[in-house]
Amino acid sequence: MENHLLLCILLLIPAFASSDFLVTHVRNIKKRNADNDLVVNGIEIYSMKIDSKVTSRFAHNIITSRAVNRGNVHKEVVFDVELPKTAFITNFSMTIDGVTYPGTIKEKEVAKKQYEKAVSKGQTAGLVKASGRKTEKFTVSVNIEAASKVTFELTYEELLKRQFGKYEMFIKVKPKQLVKDFEIEVNIFEPQGITALEAEGTFITNDLQNIIKKTFSEKKGHISFKPTLDQQRTCANCSQSLLDGDFTVKYDVKRTTPDNLQIVNGYFVHFFAPTNLPNLPKNVIFIIDISGSMSGREIEQTREALLKILDDIKGDDFFNFILFGSEVHTWKETLIKATPENLDEARKFVRGIDTEGLTNLHGGIMRGIDMLNAAHEGNLVPKRSASIIIMLTDGQPNVGISNPQDIQTHVKKAIEGKYPLYNLGFGYGVDYNFLEKMALENKGLARRIYPDSDASLQLQGFYDEVSNPMLTDVELNYPENEISDLTKNSFKHFYDGSEIVVAGRFIDSNQNSLTVDVRGEGANDALSYTTQQDAEETAKAFQEQQYIFGEYIERLWAYLTIEQLLEERIAATGEEKENLTAEALDLSLKYKFVTPLTSMVVTKPETYDNQDGIADKPIEAEAQALPPVALAPQLSYLYNSHPTWYTSVDGDPHFIISVPQKKDALCFNINENPGAVLNLINDPVTGITVNGELIGDKRVNSDAKIQNTYFGKLGIANKHLDLRLTVTPEKITIQNGNEKTGFTWLDSVTLQQEGLTLIINKEKSLVLKMGSGASFVIVLHQVWKKHPLHQDFLGLYALEREKLSEQTHGLLGQFFHPIDFTILEIHPGSDPKKPDATMIVKNNELTVTRGWQKDYRRDPKHGVDIPCWFVHNNGAGLIDGVHTDYIVSSLF
């Protein structure tokens, strides 16, 4: 290709041109081609820098992105970053052609009103809200004129947590295009001294490994990562960027004593992490959900994780398994010691775990608590030991006591604060708020296990965090007459490799010393000592002022206080919850943190005439992980409204085709035997197919001429994404490649993953969108379980026909294209209420009958009548071919 280009240039160069001119000309063309790689949809991001400063575990991060519009019309520039869930955004601004528009942090409702007001005036506004997911996505877009430049600057802060003996800082790297000047720089200052420093990235190749520069000595650590354009490319001549993944920094500090106290300007922070203590024996009860929704990949991953956990259980530990589906099953009647023989028997038990029934969560967890209580009361476990309950569930309680508040009350009363409860919610079908509240009320925590290929590693990873308790009943006591506004200072367990952090404010801001009384229970004896610190020692350690950002200990105290107030607020009710909310809101506003109670608004006044050009909105290549609160309204109109166009099949089975230009509808039935699978939609361009399997009544009605059939199973697939969705009246199963995720209709779920957006409205309907294709509503019809004749069945509603291609076909899909018909000679039919007529459609002359069918999207029980012209004989003359042409061999 390069030789051909050179030949063309030679033909265009005059005879007197020198070879130097030729070489320069070729170089300029190559440079222009390279520059074109930097422009995506007319926008070039020419600089992106991530600057992190860490002082005593508290990280202050600034992300700066600079872009220019290389097009000749207005363009929309998108600033899109993902932050750790534990981080609080503290500042944002965008500078357009030298004018800076800062963000303002306000109470959430006030911010929302300001945002809506700006939009109504035609201004560009960006709204930032805490999302509550594993990572939070911050997205702001702005229209800029041709050749204009914009600079985005985002600041966020977080307290780095210590796990497995290391502090970890996570940076998401995803510029989505090549960036001329890309850099990550991390500076760490730890007054205790740094003992280890690591940096790695999931996207780092062998070639990129040497680009990470890492140095540390005494109290300072430094990391930089600055790849050139060529180093960012996925291949030599590619325009795609390698920079897509996680960049992680890990380090630890020197410890000559268990404590480190720092005092600055009337605030203190106390880091407590003892080493060289023996681990306590532990008593662990694993309570596992084996209900039907756990079938498939979920139960396989659970078995896999439990087998690996059994390999790590120590010989002086005690343990047991409790399984709950509709019934509750125990492996042993009491906790047993982890002898080699018992562990071998446990492995056999775990390999045989399988799913059954519904979700008797209350029965399972109460059995576990009673067993642990009995073990302590009967002295069956060591007195100096740490007891833990770990519960795993993927759904919501629906057998026995199923009211969440009742379960919480029973559990709290039974545990009585004696040991922590850890709740693991598998997937998106759980009531996570319920699990979190119940765990926090019982000195534990909740963790979501994401239904990915590494789910078993997530389960095992959580166990590893709590598998090595060193102390129980830890208390860090400070003089009450000296300290106010103290963060949490008592902890049920201290685990090896972790760290306890307590911060507070002095009543006298000039106080410069502090004494702490430390107590806890260890494996051999009680831990009890007193430690003291002077402010002068902190000041001496902080002589390197260039590493200090603002009043960092005060901000650390505010961060930790807000985090704990929000946590307490989850389990609180009534006036207590109102007081906690007010206190957390005041601190969030004072210290300018974006929390679940606040939002940041960035408003840019209109500075150009939008009518001069049309902004081309960039198309994102992947689905955003939107929080449920933002996602639900996005699709809710699909079942709350009646679009001008839709097609549906519901009932036994009745097809409805809306014809907006006629302000009318057509309908027909398909009469086929139970077990037949009908192709409803097939689009070879988008790869989306929808098939449905018919079921019949429980028994054949001898009086009926034709047996009633309904759709008892729907299969929706996107072959381009290797994504399949199977829906029955019992459950919903998502298969992505080899991974399966299951939900029941008892779940209330909002889910978005790559290629799929899904909402389950408990026992009513399912709303979904596959990729950029059409959207669907599936309605659940339930009958009395003991009905002698009828069964539960499904209805399907297809919307947004413009999202599928012109090649779409199928019993419903063929009507995604406009259809015209003419009605002639309306005359009385066999039913006086339903006149007949002659219809001309697709060059066919048909006898049709005026009637109505039901739209059940809003009301699955009663439905809404939709007037339509009914085409007889399985839609003959209306559908292409005959209905048997649409019978396929299987759902997929």
Image: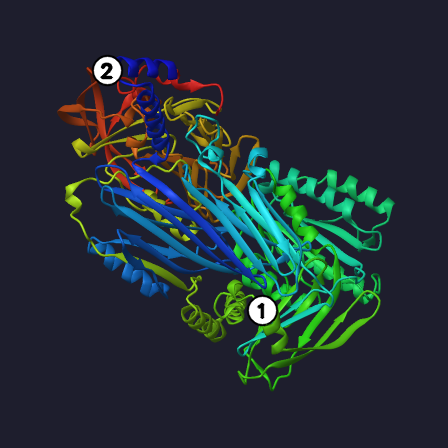
From the viewer's perspective, tell me whether residue 183 is left or right of residue 380. left
Colouring used for the render: rainbow
User: Where residue 529 sits in the image (x, y, percent)?
Assistant: 76, 76
User: Where residue 647 sits in the image (x, y, percent)?
Assistant: 30, 32
Report which quarter residue 617 is drawn in: top left
Do residues under tags 2 and 1 come within 8 Å of each other at their CB atoms? no
Label disc, if present, on residue 572 of the rendered structure: none
Distance CA(mark 2)–CA(mark 1)? 69 Å
Residue at horizontal 24 percent and vertical 54 percent from the top: 119
Q: In front here: 471 or 701?
A: 471
Report which quarter residue 292 is drawn in: top right
Residue at horizontal 29 percent and vertical 27 percent from the top: 816
Q: Is residue 507 above or below residue 406?
A: below
Query: Neighbour class for label 2 at 10 Å: few (<14), some, many (≥20)?
Result: few
User: Where residue 473 sits in the image (x, y, percent)?
Assistant: 72, 70
In the image, what residue type sits under mark 2?
Pro
Residue at horizontal 17 percent and vertical 31 percent from the top: 662
Q: Residue furthest bottom?
A: 481
Report which quarter residue 578 is drawn in: bottom left
User: Where residue 449 sits in the image (x, y, percent)?
Assistant: 58, 47
Q: In front here: 160 or 477?
A: 160
Counting residues from the N terminus, which is met first, the one under dot 2 or under dot 1? 2
- Of badges 2 and 1, the one in the foreground is 2
Q: Report helix, strand or loop for mark 1.
A: loop
The residue indicated by pointer 1 is 542
Residue 359 in view? no
Label disc, if present, on residue 14 of the rendered structure: 2
- Which image quadrant: the N terminus? top left
In the image, what residue type sits under mark 1?
Phe
From the viewer's perspective, tell me whether residue 46 is left or right of residue 486. left
Q: Report helix, strand or loop for mark 2.
A: loop
Q: Is residue 368 above or below residue 520?
A: above
